Image: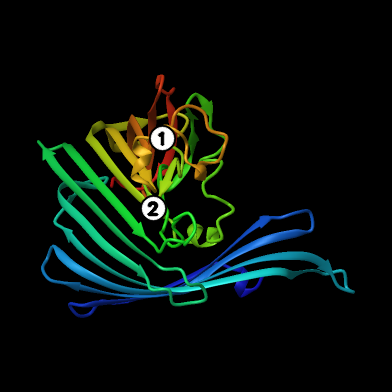
């Protein structure tokens, strides 16, 4: 075990005064098999700092600056005279960049047992890649995330969320394809533990699409590490749709499901405040506005796609949240809309509070 093959995260915050200062240092090293004798390593490390400047009890502006370094290496296994295994780098490529970010946050929401129950939350941010670093990759990404909650009586909440993201980068001289725009991955559930279902009547092989990016793209590594996720879109795989533009609408009705449950067998366990929710998720991701009128699958999705293409994905479903003390377990079932109606029920298990 070495430092460059380990994962670590350091965080420090100075919160004494009205303006808060935050500092982060991190590294992630991920490994995968290349062939019988070689493994691939993706290493991401860097520094981040941001200043949080509140203007009132409910709103603030955050200014941030992050420095990212990405290394992709192929390591070949070998042994020394003492029969100890070592890995030697046979290929390596590096990428580094600096990302300034500014965000405006407004939040007057009121929280309940599993998340916000009343009020309004909004986060608008702009991230710029000025092209500093080892690669001349430039982009500007704008995101807005707005959430409104209405408390109906004492126990019921109507929640609506709207997300929009757009990334702009310089175009190449040939074909007009974007080189620098960030990708938005639309679909999936955060903190997913397990579950799955089908897409257009075909059983899903994994939680991701089989083809998520054009592997002939020279900026593939950049896209992987600087991708923005647009979720939850329950009943759809991660990256069910992806592009340099994305929008997502979430509608939920949250209600009490089981107020008190005491079990005597096989274990004496008491559960309380088990909440339920009904939801609809609608989202789209695209590179070109013409995709909304063209029923042919864009090249970036590969060649093994059936049916007509639409950038839109629509799902509906039901779910419940169980407080297990240290974390909140979510159990949800969803149906995604397809040309023949709706899919069969798809079950998902995840962690985390309500959005």
In terms of secondary structure, where does tag 1 sit?
A: loop
Residue at the spot x=44%, y=28% of the render? 308
- Residue closer to the observer: 20 or 236: 236
Instruction: State whether residue 34 is above or below residue 273.
Output: below
Q: Is residue 67 left or right of residue 50?
A: right
Q: Nearer the viewer, residue 276 or 175?
A: 175
Whether the residues at callouts 2 and 1 have beta carbons within 8 Å, the answer is: no
Q: Which residue is mark 1?
A: 268
What's the residue at 47%, 41% (across, down)? 298
In the picture as drawn, the residue positioned furthest to the top comes out as 340
In the rendered image, the vertical position of residue 112 relative to residue 196, given as above or below: below
Q: Nearer the viewer, residue 104 or 211?
A: 211
Residue 348 placement (x, y as % from top left): 44, 35
Q: Where in the figure is residue 44, as x and y percent of width and height?
A: 53, 68
Q: Mark 1 Cα within 10 Å, few/some/many (few <14, many 20+)?
A: few
Q: Is residue 34 above or below residue 51?
A: above
Instruction: Tell me the number on the disc at residue 244.
Output: 2
Q: How is the image coloured?
A: rainbow
Q: Quadrant of residue 98?
A: bottom left
Q: Earlier in the sequence, mark 2 or mark 1?
A: 2
Q: Secondary structure at mark 2?
A: loop
Outermost residue on the right side: it is 81
Left/right placement of residue 5 relative to residue 343 reads right
Task: For the N terminus, give its image quadrant.
Answer: bottom right
The percent coordinates of residue 270 (x first, y second) are 34, 37
Between marks 2 and 1, how big is the CA–CA gap? 51 Å
């Amino acid at each position: 075990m070495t430092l460059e093959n380990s994962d670590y995260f350091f965080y420090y915050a100075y919160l004494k005064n009205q303006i808060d200062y935050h500092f982060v240092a991190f590294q992630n090293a991920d490994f995968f098999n290349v062939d019988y004798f070689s493994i691939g390593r993706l290493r991401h490390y860097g520094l981040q700092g941001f200043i949080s400047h509140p203007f009132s009890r409910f709103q603030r502006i955050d200014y941030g600056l992050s420095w990212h370094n990405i290394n992709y290496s192929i390591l070949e296994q070998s042994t020394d005279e003492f029969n100890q295994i070592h890995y030697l780098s046979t290929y390596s490529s590096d990428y580094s960049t600096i990302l300034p970010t500014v965000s405006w946050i407004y939040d007057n929401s009121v929280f309940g047992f599993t998340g916000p129950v009343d009020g309004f939350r909004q986060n608008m941010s702009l991230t710029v890649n000025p092209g500093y670093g080892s690669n001349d990759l430039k982009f500007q990404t704008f995101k807005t995330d707005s959430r409104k909650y209405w408390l109906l009586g004492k126990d019921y909440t109507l929640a609506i969320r709207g997300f929009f993201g757009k990334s702009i980068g310089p175009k190449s001289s040939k074909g007009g394809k974007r080189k620098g725009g960030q990708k938005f991955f639309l679909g999936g559930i955060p903190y997913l533990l397990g579950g799955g279902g089908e897409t257009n009547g075909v059983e899903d092989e994994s939680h991701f699409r089989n083809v998520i990016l054009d592997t002939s793209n020279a900026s593939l590594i950049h896209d992987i590490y600087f991708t923005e996720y647009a979720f939850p879109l329950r009943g759809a795989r991660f990256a069910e749709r992806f592009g340099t533009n994305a929008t997502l609408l979430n509608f939920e009705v949250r209600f009490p499901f089981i107020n008190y449950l005491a079990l005597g067998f096989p274990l004496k366990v008491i559960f309380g405040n088990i909440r339920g929710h009904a939801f609809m998720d609608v989202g789209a991701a695209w590179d070109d506005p013409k995709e909304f009128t063209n029923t042919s699958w864009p090249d970036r999705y590969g060649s093994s796609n059936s049916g007509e293409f639409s950038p839109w994905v629509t799902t509906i479903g039901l779910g419940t949240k169980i407080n297990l003390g240290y974390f909140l377990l979510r159990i949800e079932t969803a149906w995604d809309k397809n040309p023949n109606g709706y899919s069969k029920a798809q079950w998902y298990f995840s962690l985390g509070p309500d959005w």
